Amino acid sequence: MADRYLSFAGTAPGRFLTRRLGLPRPAPLRRWSPERPELDGGLLHLTAGASGLGLGLGLAPVLARTGPGTGGAADRPAAVVLDASGVRDVEGLAEVHAALHPVVRSVAASGRIVVLGAPLDAADHHRAAAQQALEGFTRSLGKEIGRGRTVNLVRLTDASAAESTLRFLLSPKSAYVSGQVIEVGDQEVTAPDDWNRPLAGRTALVTGAARGIGEAVAETLAREGAEVVVLDVPQAEQDARRVAERLGGTALPLDITAADAGARIADALPGGLDVLVHNAGITRDRRLANMPAERWGPVLEVNLASVLRTTDALLAAGTLKRGGRIVATASIAGIAGNAGQTNYGASKAGITGLVRALAPRALAEHGVTVNAVAPGFIETRMTAAVPLLIREAGRRMNSLAQGGLPVDVAETTAWLAHPASAAVNGQVVRVCGQSLLGA
């Protein structure tokens, strides 16, 4: 369903009324397209604090490879990267203000600000306090900057390990990702032969991929070069085959809740699997006092239990190759909660627990990373059926004042599935336009 308010707010009368009445003023977001794959404008690289981690030497060549295009006005950068990894105390935080204060207004519409910080150091509480302060700074700036611009914080020690992350955050692909804190480890990373098709030669399986967000994920992974397996329930086999045929992949009609689902996936993929995307999910909303077990059980079974069983089976069977990626789907409902969704919120919070506990072990034992995306209000057929006032609240209650699109979840999933994202592990990344609900 079209967002008529977004369209109206972009007209001259709409701009006048929203300004006079203090209403949300959403800006159309610049998303990736083959014709315009990069942001228009230059990249401004700033530094705050002492050069404590030595990012300066390794960061410049990475930014030279990952930055936006060269179009646009020279005095309106498309992106700003502030290296604050050397900030060690409150005095260093003053340099953060001094660096961004003069330039923040000049960032182009749909531009990007990325703050680089250091991992928190428990041995130095002054430094830890200063680095944690960057999180509050980043989230607050994201809520005030407007005009479709985003602000994110990346904690890292090695700039080269963060190249795939910086490419994502400094591109139109991250249009609906803002106010996020992403930690990048120091794992060895190998750059792909072709950054435009990083998944070439890799096999990706997406559950619930016959329609909606799952279909968008399958499309995006195929665009990135993957051979996609479109898995959905037998009742959706016709749609799954239609999607698979269009993408040059294969369809796998299968009930993911079946006890032997993992074994059947392994049998269907004798050559192994590089990317596993757990997207399948259902809702059965009702307040707890009115929720019978028949509405609780299926949601937990599809959204959480099947993910646990299938993941365990595919790891144990060795179907997921070393260097593989698992990307699960959490939700803002699992972070902030949602009335009428105790079952759904529990299932999606469970995904977060799975990611945080399994990620270090899966990497150590199997060479596989485990991450999750947590969508907020995404424009789908399901949200189109939500009552008008609730739908409008969902759209406006984020820093970008609009709903996201399935492709926003898909682009984030593709970044986490990237072979050069080996140093991104155990992360739950919200794709919610920086929802005003939750942390």
Image: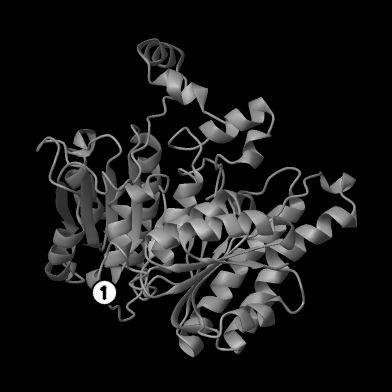
From where the camera sits, is residue 325 visible? Answer: yes
Quadrant location of the N terminus in the rendered image = top right
Q: Report the front residue among 412 and 51.
A: 412
Q: Report the front residue among 354 and 3.
A: 3
The amino acid type, in three-letter code, at marker 1 is: Ala
Image height of 295 relative to 286, above or below? below
Image height of 319 relative to 127, above or below? below
From where the camera sits, is residue 330 visible? Answer: no
Q: Report the front residue among 317 and 129.
A: 317
Q: Is residue 354 left or right of residue 23?
A: right
Whole-percent x and y of residue 123? 36, 76
Q: Classify mark 1: helix, strand or loop.
A: loop
Count of numbered badges drawn on the protein: 1
Whole-percent x and y of residue 97? 23, 45
Circle 1 packing at 10 Å, graded few (<14), some (14-19), many (20+), is: some
Q: Is residue 300 left or right of residue 198?
A: right
Hey, which quadrant is residue 26 in on the image? top left
Hey, which quadrant is residue 227 in on the image? bottom left
Image height of 42 relative to 346, above or below? above
Question: What colouring method underlies this structural image?
Answer: one colour
Residue in view at x 19 percent, y 54 percent? 67
Whole-percent x and y of residue 41? 16, 42
| Residue named by callout 1 | 191
Image height of 327 relative to 136, above or below? below
Residue in view at x 47 percent, y 63 percent? 248
Whole-percent x and y of residue 346? 71, 58
Residue in view at x 63 percent, y 83 percent? 267
